[in-house]
Amino acid sequence: MTISTFRSLGLLMAALMCAAGAGVLAPLAVDAAPTEQTDPSAASAVSAAGTGTEADAAAPSASDSAQRHHVHAHHDRDLVDIADDSVLEAGKEADSVVSVFGNTRVEGTVRSDVVSVFGNDYIDNKVGGDAVSVFGNVELGPHAAIAGDVVTIFGELTRDPLATIGGESRSVFGHHLLAPTGLRSWIEHCLLYGRPLSLAGGLGWAWGVALSLLALYLCIAVVVRSGVESCVETFERHPGASILAALLAGLLTPLVLILLCVTIIGIAAVPFAVMGLVCIALLGKTVILAWLGRAALRLRGNDASGTYTVPHPALAVLVGGLIVLALYLVPFFGFLFYNLLGFLGFGAVVYTAILGLRARQEARTATAAGRSGMSGAVPPTGAVPPTAGAAPPTGAVPPTDAVPPTESAPAAATPPPFAAAAAASPVVTADLPRAGFWIRMIALLIDVVLVGACTHLLHSYSNAHLVLLAAYGAIMWKLRGSTVGGIVFDLRVIRLDGRDMDWETAIIRALSCFLSLVVAGLGFFWIAFDPANQAWHDKIAGTVVVRVPKSLPPV
């Protein structure tokens, strides 16, 4: 690269810095503008002196600033626009013109540079400095006279034969390498709207990338079918644990990479670690698409025998991929769906690996215990190993610890009293009747009033009412299986897998309550429409709320 190229890159950095500071400086400029003309005597003195030209030139600039709806700054005769076009009309002057995510049209005189980022330049007058366009084109009219260089980065230059350039014209990474029109169309119609895809024109390459990734996910589902199915089952059975695993993995991954980079030997392992993370991310995206496809196909219903047939992972991935492509079109939520699905899939893969390692460790422990039991077996104390040629003694007396079978059988068959009582008493499981929407809301209201009264007494914690309510719920669910409001109405929080409530599930359920509340309480209203009467936090934690019969204690 020549010196002019580096200078152009420096102008690019200056443009980005000006664009970033324009949003902060614009209000200051607008507020400061009226103060410059607060002295009417000074204004009349200037007019009498014959310098009214500057006042006439400033008036249109103030009106243009008032009419613009985008970020616009006009400081020291610098024209800066973000997400809007910069226009310098004929007969006007400016020190420099900068436009970010917008086009630049210069028909007046510019003393310094003209810079546009993700926009095109049209210049038809004198420019005292350089003309730079990044991801855009530069067009020079017949009256254009550029004193410096003309630089296009990922763009092209169109020049009228009468236009003059005092310096050099440079094209860095020409437009054939990366079409600026398609990229700018993606920025305008996708990035600025917070979504990966759009139906606007010029986005065929983006849809090609999306469909290519979907084809890659289909190949992964076919090649590692068992792995995808295992991860999907893990996410369905342990959604809360999968989310927690994703959070921990996201926090620990940067630390591990930093530690590998710090050590001399670990630097060689960094590329392999990054490749492993990429593979986990791809597998996780495949898993979450298969999970969505399964859920959509399950809504279709069962077969003629009344049973649900699990589809092939490739079919599930295809259906889930089509659903996700439709979700990617939603403005302001497309990128949210993209990141959320990747996050959930990453957690499902990580937690499946954790469960696999745990099962392997348990199998090794059981095998070692079995071997040690066989090697340490000792014959009964009353038994004597026979020797060769020895006849049994005629007056042999059976060993004292031997008990006749007729006497030991009844004693072994009779269970202890506490075991019989435990077997006779019913067990609280997820098969009990589910608690409906209204009774759960009334129980929640009791808990809210109770926690609110306690926080009112503790004035220093009055602003943390929701946090204390979540902590109260997590503690009560772990220790008693229900809150005070649930005890009043004989409600119990039960895990779907039949295990006892642990701290992990209780905390995940408490934190997930914020998600049920943040979307206008829709997660709680979901109880009334869900067939299993589960709220969003129930589905995340894998729990249900059941009504305990009167014959059983509520806690």
Image (cartoon, grey):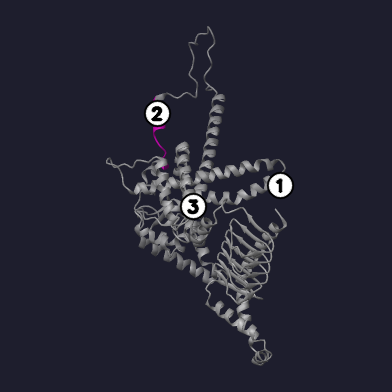
Quadrant occupied by the C terminus: bottom left
Badge 2 or badge 3: first in the primary sequence: 3
Q: Which residue is mark 1?
A: 262
Q: Which residue is mark 2?
A: 409
Badge 1 or badge 2: first in the primary sequence: 1
Camera-nearest residue between 320 and 429: 320
Camera-nearest residue between 482 and 20: 20
| Rendered location of residue 476, percent (x, y) | 48, 57
Q: Give the Cα separation between the discs numbered 2 and 3.
A: 77 Å
**Disc 3 vs disc 1: which is toward the camera?**
3
| Callout 3: SS | helix
On screen, residue 47 versus residue 476, left or right, reads: right
Q: Is residue 528 above or below residue 91?
A: above
Residue 535 is tagged as: none
| Callout 2: SS | helix
Q: Which residue type does callout 1 highlight? A: Val
Q: Which residue type does callout 3 highlight? A: Ala
Looking at the rendering, the stretch of residues picked out in magenta corresponds to: 406-418
| Callout 1: SS | helix
| Rendered location of residue 524, percent (x, y) | 41, 61
Q: Is residue 164 magenta?
A: no
Q: Give the Cα separation between the discs numbered 1 and 2.
A: 68 Å
Decide: marks 2, 3 in contact (CB < 8 A)?
A: no
